[in-house]
């Protein structure tokens, strides 16, 4: 094609027919310092230090996930209210238990410091603030950080209010549950997870049809079981 000078359009058509995957152009900041910082935090394969930062980020994510899981174990879980009220020495003033001395809270704080630092640096160095804000992975990063600050604000409000509950425990637990989204942060550093995500995205229509047919099957067979056993005196359907 190059010999006969058929042009770039013919070359691109040939590459598409042969299944050649064209590499996406990497938008880089115009400023040299921002470009170096962006490559350092966004593209681990660009240099050795960038690979080291990626390894640190993965380790922090894994530590955060492990801490999230350990907090649910009975040996470590505290089912009491976030603010523990106990009689003081004179028996009149309440003692407000401090969550800031909890080892899990300390490790969580260190992880959040790294996540916040990484997010702010990447936002500062990104070539387009609008594109950065619309990226789904960056939204996940923000969602994974917000529960910590909400929990921290609630704890501080309760301490200043002498133990008065600042937020419903149910709402607080739901907010803390959002931390599980941190597991999706691993996809930023895993090509396999990125490929899996693209595969699921491309197969959404087929997956939707599969779920639809499964739903129809569940309705048909559950209805058949119900009408087959409804008249049986010992059936649970008749009770």
Image: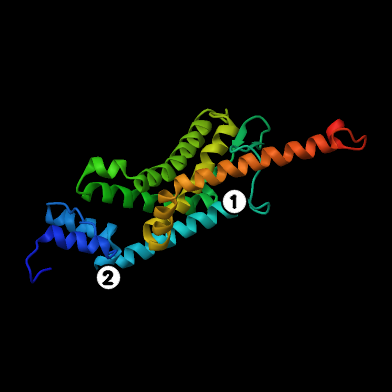
Residue labelled with disc 1: 71
> Vertically, is 31 above or below 227?
below
**Where residue 182 sits in the image (x, y, percent)?**
46, 50
* Horizontal arrangement in the rendering, residue 174 relative to residue 60 (left or right): right
* Horizontal arrangement in the rendering, residue 71 relative to residue 23 (left or right): right
Seen at 16% across and 63% down, the residue is 11
- Can residue 22 be seen here? The reply is no
**Where residue 114 sits in the image (x, y, percent)?**
37, 53
Seen at 62% across and 33% down, the residue is 94
Q: Residues within 10 Å of mark 1 (few under 14, many from 20)?
A: some
Outermost residue, right side: 233
**Where residue 10 sits in the image (x, y, percent)?**
15, 60
* Horizontal arrangement in the rendering, residue 29 relative to residue 186 (left or right): left
Seen at 12% across and 60% down, the residue is 8
**Where residue 139 sits in the image (x, y, percent)?**
37, 43
- Could you say whether the residue bearing mark 2 is in a helix, strand or loop? helix
Question: Nearer the N terminus, badge 1 or badge 2?
Answer: 2
Seen at 62% across and 40% down, the residue is 215
Viewer-side residue, 93 vs 86: 86
Q: CA distance from mark 1 to mark 2?
A: 35 Å
Q: Residues within 10 Å of mark 2 (few under 14, many from 20)?
A: few
Query: Quadrant location of the N terminus?
Result: bottom left
CB atoms at circles 1 and 2 under 8 Å apart?
no
Q: Indicate the quadrant where residue 59 lies.
A: bottom left
> Vertically, is 59 above or below 167?
below
**Tag nearer the camera, 1 or 2:** 2
- Could you say whether the residue bearing mark 1 is in a helix, strand or loop? loop
The tag on residue 48 is 2
């Amino acid at each position: 094609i190059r010999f006969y000078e058929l042009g770039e359009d013919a070359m691109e058509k040939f590459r598409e027919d042969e299944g050649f995957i064209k590499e996406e152009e990497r938008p880089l900041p115009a400023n040299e310092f921002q470009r170096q910082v962006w490559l350092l935090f966004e593209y681990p394969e660009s240099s050795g230090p960038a690979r080291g930062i990626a390894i640190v980020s993965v380790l922090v994510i894994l530590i955060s996930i492990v801490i999230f899981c350990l907090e649910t174990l009975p040996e470590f879980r505290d089912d009491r209210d976030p603010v523990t009220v106990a009689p003081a020495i004179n028996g009149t003033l309440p003692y407000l238990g401090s969550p800031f001395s909890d080892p899990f809270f300390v490790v969580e704080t260190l992880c959040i410091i790294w996540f916040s630092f990484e997010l702010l640096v990447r936002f500062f160095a990104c070539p387009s603030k609008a594109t950065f804000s619309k990226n789904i992975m960056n939204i996940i990063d923000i969602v994974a950080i917000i529960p910590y600050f909400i929990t921290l604000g609630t704890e501080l409000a309760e301490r200043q209010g002498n133990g008065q509950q600042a937020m419903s425990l149910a709402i607080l637990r739901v907010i803390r549950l959002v931390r599980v989204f941190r597991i999706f942060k691993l996809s930023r550093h895993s090509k396999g997870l990125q490929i899996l995500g693209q595969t699921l995205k491309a197969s959404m229509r087929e997956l939707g049809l599969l779920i639809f047919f499964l739903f129809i099957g569940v309705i048909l067979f559950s209805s058949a079981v119900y009408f087959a056993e409804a008249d049986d005196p010992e059936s649970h359907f008749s009770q």
